[in-house]
Image: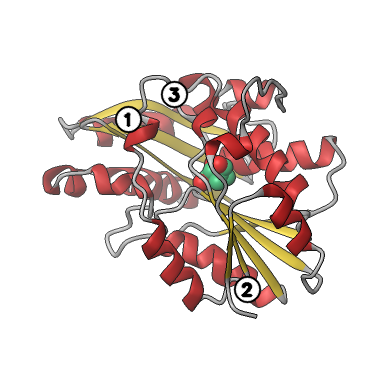
Amino acid sequence: MSMKVVEKIDDMKRLRQQLTEPVGFVPTMGYLHEGHLALIRWARTENPSLVVSLFVNPTQFDPQEDFSQYPRDPERDFGLLEKERADIVFMPSVDEMYPPRFNSWVEVGRLTERLEGASRPGHFRGVTTVVAKLFNIIQPTRAYFGQKDAQQVVVIKKMVAELNMNLEIVTVPTMREGDGLAMSSRNTYLNPEEREVATVLYQAISLAQKLWVRGETNAQVIRQQMLTLIRKEPLAAIDYISIADTETLDELDTVKSPALVSLAVKIGNTRLIDNVVLE
Ligand code: PAF
């Protein structure tokens, strides 16, 4: 079947009935890069049917982060998705997803109050609401998320488990540039000097991994060393450095396997995140 681009929820639901099971689903905000393509290829190999959504979700943006400035290039995305043999591209308008007076929200507690949630209040409420809506519309067998947004994966798995949603969440490893920078649509905001400095996130998580492999289990020592490394870069401003339990996201004093090392750093005006699981 040739790829269909669908903008209306009713059309998406109708076409869903014609897809061969199991159905793989990759939710995206578009402006696809190799990181998205890794998810899409993974989903393609595991499922005879593949749906990809392109929707820049306004409810997950911070007020000071410009939703309208988020990069978009649907025509280019369609070309890439055709090559990956997507069956359906679901690209609803904001009004289609959030009609006037929309007022129902999906919220996961506690877990969303820390790390990204602490720095970006309301962000996860937007993510879980749109992801729950997309799951209801598309009814996938499996949905694919990148490990790059580690907390997002933990939050979505909890939502799926606790709200008894009938699908499997598959996590795909982070794709990196040659120098280690995690792929992200936000990397396009970096100027050449900032782009060089941005590798400091990968250097910091690599340092954490190295210390752990050498036997360091004091989380504060590891955090401190990461901090010292990043502070050497005048263009980098640390938002947080965390070493936490992979399920509860509670900060650890003593590192035990598996532990999630994650960080958010502003490089110039661009906020970047990265993580590694110590195991
Ligand atoms: O990870 C993303 O790109 C977004 O948070 C998602 C899952 C597509 C929801 O808008």
Front residue (pair 6, 71): 6
Front residue (pair 217, 146): 146
Q: Residues within 10 Å of mark 3 (few under 14, many from 20)?
A: some
Residue 226 visible in rendering: no
Residue 105: % across, % down: 70, 25
Q: Mark 3 belongs to which amino acid?
A: Asp
Which mark lies nearer to you, 1 or 3? Answer: 3
Cα distance between the residues tagged 1 and 2: 40 Å
Front residue (pair 29, 196): 29
On the rendered image, what quadrant is the N terminus found in? bottom right
Disc 3 is placed on an element classified as: loop
- Quadrant position of residue 176: bottom left
Left or right of residue 54, residue 110 in this image = right
Which residue is at a point 36% across and 40% down the rendered structure image?
70
Q: Which residue is mark 1?
A: 227
Q: Which residue is mark 2?
A: 44
N-terminal of the pair, mark 1 or mark 2, is 2
Q: Mark 1 belongs to which amino acid?
A: Leu
Residue 185 visible in rendering: yes
Check the image and report above or below for 104 versus 191: above
Q: Which residue is mark 3?
A: 62
Left or right of residue 52, residue 108 in this image = right
Which residue is at a point 42% across and 71% down the rendered structure image?
79
Cα distance between the residues tagged 3 and 2: 33 Å
Residue 279: % across, % down: 60, 52
Q: State yes or no: discs 1 and 3 in contact (Cβ < 8 Å).
A: no
Front residue (pair 214, 151): 151
Disc 1 is placed on an element classified as: helix
Residue 124: % across, % down: 59, 29
